[in-house]
Image (cartoon, grey):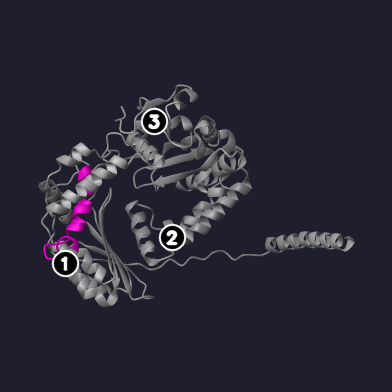
Amino acid sequence: MKKIYLILVMCFVSSVLFAREMGDFVKNIKLSPLVVHFPEIQKEVLENGTEIQFLSNPEFPIVYADFHIYHGRKNLGKRPVEIVRLLEDSWEFSGSKTYPKDSFLQEFEKLGAGFSLAIDYDKTSIHLSYLKKDEERIFSLLKSFWEEPNLNSEVISTMRGRITDEIKRRNDNPTQLGGRKAKEALYKNTIYGSTSQISSLEQIREEDLLSLQKEILSEKKKILLLTGDANLQTWKSYLSRWKNYESSGQKTSEEITSELLAENIKNSKQKNILVEKEVAQSFVYMTGVIPKHNDPDFYAIQVLNYIIGGGGFNSYYMREIRNNRGLAYSAGSSADFQADYGTINFFAMTKTESVPEVLSLMKELIEPKLIDSLKEEELTRAKVAINNQFVFLFEDSRKTLTNELRFRDHKMPKDYLLKFRENIDKVSLEDLRRVGKKYFSSSDMLVVIVGPKSLQSQLGGSFRLVQPEEILP
């Protein structure tokens, strides 16, 4: 028995000494600074105005091509918003006149290639991936899709039915429901904030779809992102022979700014909204306005967001709400920066009876009292984490090109990437206090909660009760 006891003691002491030695060892390691070599992106503009951004990566015989046409949802004008999704699905699955309906996508599947079309807020995008040996065949299929656009009435009817079913089921997920209602309130009276309705979807005619399709095809601003084992000269030759559509007239464009969103919150008749839904877990969501991507406060907001809720298990939200108090299944925050505006979002999933306490704590954790108490060590950890994540912007050549285009669309400085880590390192505790007071005030935010009607009395009567499909005033 004494021998066993002695062995246990020796094991315990040795493990403590070993842990201490390991800690000292790691502490004294001198790590060299992370060096990032930015890839050289080749850029050319063809005579027809199409721009090509090319990044060679011949590691595998695969080519990736993403064709961006700068005509999207924001250019709808007075058209119903439902037309975007209906055209997106109908166009892709209608194929071309030579390869109608399923036969078009089947040709890609035979080659093991990928093809998809998406109509986003800013632009319409065609995404391709294929083996280099099949390039001539891919060019032939793509030419057919571009020069022989097709919209099949049977496909349109099928897609209309699918979208209708999706609309009927869109309130099933409480997080998606809460995000949608917050979006409706924050982006009020904009195309971006408009929610699809079945009645409007049913009114869209085939000629309406053809008109929008023609507008997209005639858009002059087009950018091709080309990478993988691609041949730039071959693509230049191909695109120079591509059919050019005549302009369909002056296009309208919606503009969303941080000032517009802040005004929407200020003029909102009710900043606190309870969306009635019987759920096992209630969803709590707060959203506010931050500046656009190229604003000088971008770096400080990124760091503060990481500390408060964006850093996962390292953040105050996860530590205080989930780990220490066990009040939420998940909690966090995100900062979304766009070309002309930005939003900051805080969220948590919790038991219904915990909602009032969780909401109170979510607000408390972004108050000046906490932000003013942040320590230099917390700031340093956040900056190191953000700078370490920076390298993943370049983890593959396709992602590199996509990010490069996004930064240019957002009018970021030419040396943005070069000085990113330097600018993050410059963020001080005083910067965090300043942006915290300016952008992280819960009194300037919309609050949306998805949960049962009984929550209204628990929340003190300050919340307006709405139904999932109710149009907000």
Residue lying farthest right? 2
Q: Nearer the viewer, residue 291 or 105?
A: 105
> Where the C terminus falls, by quadrant?
top left
The answer to the question of whether label 3 and label 2 lie on touching residues, with beta carbons closer than 8 A, is: no
Q: Residues within 10 Å of mark 3 (few under 14, many from 20)?
A: some
Was residue 435 drawn as part of the magenta stretch in this picture? no
On the image, numbered disc 3 is attached to which residue?
Answer: 276
Q: Which mark is residue 143?
A: 1
- The main secondary structure of the magenta stretch is helix
Was residue 86 drawn as part of the magenta stretch in this picture? yes
User: Where in the figure is residue 268, as x and y percent of width and height?
Assistant: 35, 27
On the image, numbered disc 2 is attached to which residue?
Answer: 393
Going from N to C along the chain, the mark reached first, 3 or 1, is: 1
Residue lying farthest bottom? 133
> Where the N terminus falls, by quadrant?
bottom right
Mark 3 vs mark 1: in front: 3
**Magenta extent:** 82-102
Q: CA distance from mark 1 to mark 2?
A: 32 Å
Residue at 53%, 40% (x, y): give it: 328
